């Protein structure tokens, strides 16, 4: 009858249905364990960076900044430049390994983050912002890894014994290497900005959009990490003005996020995915509401919010 057709069309084109598409299927078990592994890998990469920086600072055979800068004078002694490249070649295999570990750790955050967005509801703008920021951060990290691997591989080869460069050539290639690193400063610092945006979006979801879905401390932890990450982005760029001082401050803030705060955040995501998705629903949709009612949560979980979704 015409009345049934009108009812069907009304349901199909209602704003609520258009704003809440059918939920994708997610493997909650995969997301949970990927969060745990990503936390461990991020922690390990940060520990490596701290140890490498500490070893470089305590190396008595290395040159200070003044001696290194004097080596670029026409009559300067290039001993410091040779020491610089010797240290670069010695650390290259280990640095490459941990760059791969860091990039893979970022990759493993994606299933956990997308499942968290599923829990909050994809119809919220903040969920889309958080997922997009993490995805772009992943691309930035892999770009950083590939650029640095190629850059280091070629420069280590050119400055090695096979080429036997004279002093002026060695100075030139070292300055070119430093300049090339500086060209990517803004791009590689973007991962801090993207992390800050993503975590602040998560905080808005937890404190405003879906209060009570995740613990309040988790949302406030997201605020703290997001603010520190954005500050660290500014410090990364400001190092060009006061290199030594701001490098130290940026190292401390980055260590606080990578060594303590962000691993805790990832572990918390994994733990609460276990709470909100019982063992008999792993691999099934988090949302099991009837057709047309996609609030972003499974009503079979523990402690789930049941309020109606916003209408866009």
Image (tube, rainbow, N blue to C red):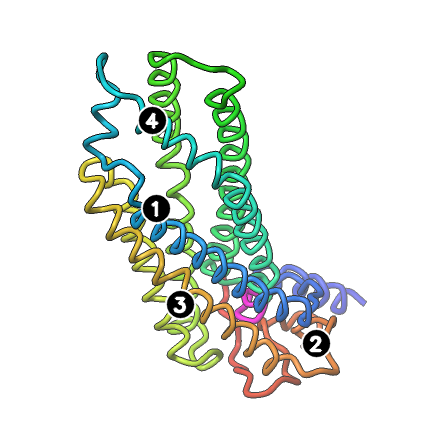
Q: Is disc 1 placed on a helix, strand or loop?
A: helix
Observer-side mark, 1 or 2, equals 1
What distance separates the C-alpha of mark 4 from that of mark 1? 15 Å
* Residue sitting nearer the eye, 231 or 118: 231
Q: Position of residue 309 (x, y in %)?
A: 52, 72
Left or right, 100 with respect to 202, comes to right
Q: Residue at x 51, y 38 (%)?
A: 92
Q: Magenta region: which residues?
A: 116-121
Q: Identify the disc placed on residue 56.
A: 1
Other-residue count near label 2 (Cα within 10 Å), few / some / many at <14 / 14–19 / ≥20: few
Q: Residue at x 40, y 50 (%)?
A: 52
Residues tagged 1 and 2 counted as in contact (Cβ below 8 A)? no
Q: Identify the disc placed on residue 260.
A: 3
Residue beneath disc 4: 81
Q: Residue furthest right?
A: 1
Q: Is disc 2 placed on a helix, strand or loop?
A: loop
Residues tagged 3 and 4 counted as in contact (Cβ below 8 A)? no
What distance separates the C-alpha of mark 1 from that of mark 3? 23 Å
Q: Residue furthest bottom?
A: 303
Choose the circle earlier in sequence order: 3 or 4.
4
Q: Position of residue 5 (x, y in %)?
A: 76, 64
What distance separates the C-alpha of mark 1 from that of mark 2? 60 Å
Question: Can you tell which quarter of the image residue 168 is in?
Answer: top left
Residues tagged 1 and 3 counted as in contact (Cβ below 8 A)? no
């Amino acid at each position: 009858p015409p009345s049934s057709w009108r009812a069907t069309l009304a349901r199909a084109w209602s704003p609520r249905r258009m704003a809440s598409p059918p939920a994708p299927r997610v493997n909650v078990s995969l997301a949970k364990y990927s969060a745990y592994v990503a936390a461990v890998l991020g922690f390990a990469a940060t520990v490596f960076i701290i140890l490498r920086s500490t070893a470089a600072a305590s190396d008595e055979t290395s040159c200070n900044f003044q001696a290194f800068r004097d080596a670029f004078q026409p009559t300067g002694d290039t001993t410091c430049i040779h020491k610089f490249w010797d240290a670069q070649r010695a650390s290259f295999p280990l640095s490459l390994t941990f760059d791969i570990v860091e990039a893979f750790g970022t990759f493993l955050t994606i299933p956990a983050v997308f499942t968290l967005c599923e829990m909050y509801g994809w119809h919220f703008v903040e969920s889309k912002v958080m997922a997009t920021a993490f995805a772009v951060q992943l691309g930035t990290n892999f770009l950083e890894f590939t650029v640095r691997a190629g850059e280091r591989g070629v420069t280590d080869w050119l400055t090695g014994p096979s080429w036997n460069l004279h002093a002026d050539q060695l100075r030139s290639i070292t300055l070119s290497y430093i300049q090339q690193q500086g060209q990517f400063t803004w791009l590689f610092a973007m991962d801090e900005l993207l992390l800050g945006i993503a975590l602040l979006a998560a905080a808005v979801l937890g404190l405003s959009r879906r209060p009570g879905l995740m613990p309040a401390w988790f949302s406030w932890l997201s605020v703290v990490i997001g603010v520190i990450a954005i500050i660290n982005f500014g410090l990364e760029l400001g190092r060009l003005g006061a290199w030594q001082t701001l490098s130290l401050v940026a190292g401390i803030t980055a260590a606080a996020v990578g060594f303590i705060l962000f691993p805790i955040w990832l572990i918390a995501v994994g733990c609460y995915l276990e709470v909100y998705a019982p063992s008999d629903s792993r691999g099934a949709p988090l949302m099991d509401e009837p057709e047309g009612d996609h609030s972003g949560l499974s009503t079979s979980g523990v402690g789930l919010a049941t309020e109606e979704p916003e209408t866009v």
